[in-house]
Amino acid sequence: MSRGSDLGDRIDGLGRATAAARGRLPDPVVDEAEATVGRATHRLGLTADHTVVALAGATGSGKSSTFNALAGVELSSVGVRRPTTSWATACVWGKAGADELLEWLGIAPRHQVMRDSLLDLGKEDSALQGVVLLDLPDHDSTEVSHHLEVNRLIELTDLMVWVLDPQKYADAAVHDRYLAPFASHKDVMLVVLNHIDEVPEDRRQAMLDDVRRLVDADGLDGVPVLATSARTGEGIDALRSEIQRRVKAKSVTRSRIQADLKDAATRLQEASGTSTHPALSKERIAALEDAFADAAGVPTVVAAVESATRLRAGRATGWPVTSWISRLRPDPLRRLHLDLGEAGKEFTRRGRTSVPAATSVQRARVDSEVRAVADEVSAPLARPWADAVRRASVSRLPDLNDRLDSALAGTELDADRIPVWAGAVRLLQWVLLLAALVGLGWLGVLAGDQYLSGSNPSAPEVGGFLLPTALLLGGVILGVLLALACRLLVSATARSRARTADRRLREAISRVADELVVAPVRGELAAYDTVREGLAGALK
């Protein structure tokens, strides 16, 4: 048996499911599955040449007598009224490779007997070759340590043999605590009705039929029920033959591990559920991102980008004589600390913005959309997973304000970059203003010369106007007209910049929504899928 076998695949599947379920499903169920994986893995790493067979029973059931009868020598002390087996005793047929197995079982060396070393018996016993036979403490002992030892070894045993007493074979202690709970392990279980010699012959079959009825009621239909008498030897050979048959088939250990894995996987599946879940819809994610964008103040920033672009481009393309007035107006982006440059970020620390905080309505919308995201995918899931998805959806929300603010501050808005055409217009405006100033100065010189000399100075004419007059009027009129005409281009540029800023900001907000809500939710769904797939592999 290797980890690459079908059994190994089952172990790996349950191991993956257990790891993914940790912290999401109830700890006792996950702990049980994890322990089962550990036991199965360890058992597969030990010898496959030995099969652990445990004799378990109540006080006075003759368990130790049966152990001695199978071993062919008195190894365990026998008692009737009170427990005499305080610790498990092991009798091993075939020592090679058994030491590590016995160490894993926790059987102290002083409680181990190698059957092959009992040379004084005068005969070899090869029928049970490869068997590690355990005599367990009485499960109904008043000593708590005895209960714990029985429960511990029952989990490690390959084949369980339950020895019942004709006087109390119907005792609820054995049926409710051991037989019924191990119904899934019926393939690795035997039931022995001991002391059959003490039952009148005419009542024996009726008693065996009653035991059969009780065992079937425990869910153990098909489990052999054997009648024995350790004192007279009746039925011991049949019991030995049944054990030998099971051991020779080399399937007991595998069957026990499979039963353990199936039992643990079934319990984990009951806690986890088997429902499928829908994928997060694009519409739901878009609604979440829109709520985040609204709470972050994206509409406010976009409006500021448009206003700032109008202001800055208008200042660049306006008539220089009047455009300086726009410098008296506050810059919308600088007021929001969104266009301060590196020096400004250093001054304000961490480049935080001054975008107004989300209102209660906006925050309520965010909470509503986050719940909607969790509810959409968790509705079909069992309660533990639905709770895990909801916890994950809100686990990062305390960071929301900082992350949204950082997203705004870190987005390149390009509002400070003047369009190329605006730079050309600014140069042309200054040329026109210079022409107007030249014309004005020229006219001033002509007026002064006329005043001082009393003559009428001459100047070149253009289109019936003196050139200085044409320069002055042309510079002023063309400058004003150009400024008015550029307003259309400024408006178009401002709207284009606003659309670009809106797209970039929403992309940044989308990353925040994914990091804080969508990714954690998808992580829980991925864990759920891992559990489902792992359990499907363990239960196949």
Image (spheres, rainbow, N blue to C red):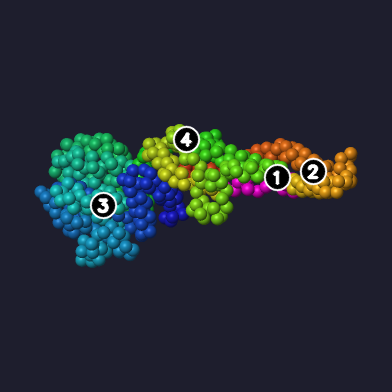
Mark 1 or 4, closer to the camera:
1
Q: Is residue 428 left or right of residue 81?
A: right
Specify the label residue 178 is tagged with: none
Q: Judge depth for marks 2 and 3 and give the one in front.
A: 2
Circle 3 is placed at which residue position? 152
Residues in magenta, as a range: 411-428
Marks 4 and 3 sit apart, C-alpha to C-alpha, by: 58 Å
Q: Could you tell me if residue 30 is visible in this image? A: yes
In terms of depth relative to the viewer, which is nearer, 448 or 509? 448
Q: Nearer the viewer, residue 109 or 474?
A: 474
Type of residue at label 4? Answer: Gln
Q: 404 or 478, which lies in front?
A: 478
Residue 106 among those drawn in magenta: no
Q: Nearer the viewer, mark 2 or mark 1?
A: 2
At 17% from the left and 44% from the top, the residue drawn is 165
> Where is residue 169 shown, x and y percent of the image?
19, 40
Q: Looking at the rendered structure, which numbered label has been put on residue 362? A: 4
Q: Position of residue 274 (x, y in %)?
A: 42, 37
Q: Which residue is mark 2?
A: 472
Q: Quadrant of the N terminus?
A: bottom left
Dot 2 crowding, Cα within 10 Å, few <14, some 14–19, many 20+: many
The span from disc 2 to disc 3 (Cα, nearest Å) is: 107 Å
Which residue is pictured at 20% across the width and 35% down the height?
206
If you read the primary sequence from the N terminus, does the residue marked by circle 2 or circle 1 appear first? 1
Disc 3 is placed on an element classified as helix
Q: Which mark is residue 320?
A: 1
Q: How many residues crowd mark 3 within 10 Å: few (<14), some (14–19), many (20+)?
A: few
